[in-house]
Image: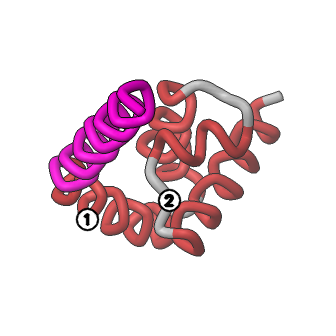
Amino acid sequence: MNNRLEQRAVILGEYIIENGATVRSAAKKFGISKSTVHKDVSERLKREDPMLYAQVKKVLEINKKERHIRGGLATKRKYEVIAENKKQRQR
């Protein structure tokens, strides 16, 4: 079983690098929890493939620095939808 977990960590790491994926998007893609993805790429991957771990860490650091922007855009979209729905109800 331990080998399977290490393989999953490598697969997740490769996916994150290839797609610039966030922990959340990787979790959704593979049908596992964010906590599991985080543990795999921060602990298991470090032991299994240190070079891949370093690359994944860089991608996740970029994502961490940009998350406030993504959050702001999501909030903007939310209120645009609310405003559009309000306009449609008034017609």
Which residue is located at x 54 percent, y 37 percent? 37
Q: Can you identify the residue that label 1 sits on?
A: 62
35 lies above or below 10: above
Give 19 or 45, whichever is nearer the viewer. Answer: 19
Amino acid marked by disc 2? Ala
**What's the magenta region?**
68-91
Q: Please state the horizontal and vertical placement of residue 1, each as a whole percent of the image.
A: 83, 28
SS at mark 2?
loop
Q: Which quadrant holds the C terminus? A: top left
Q: Secondary structure at mark 1?
A: helix
Residue 58 position in % (x across, y down): 31, 68
Q: Is residue 65 a member of the stretch shown in magenta?
A: no
Q: Residue at x 47, y 68 (%)?
A: 20
| Residue, disc 2 | 21
Q: Is residue 19 left or right of residue 90?
A: right
Position above or below: 86 against 75: above
What separation in Å lies between label 1 and label 2 (alpha carbons)? 10 Å
Badge 1 amino acid: Ile
Between residue 84 and residue 61, name the one nearer to us: 84
Tell me which residue sits at (54%, 51%) in the image: 45
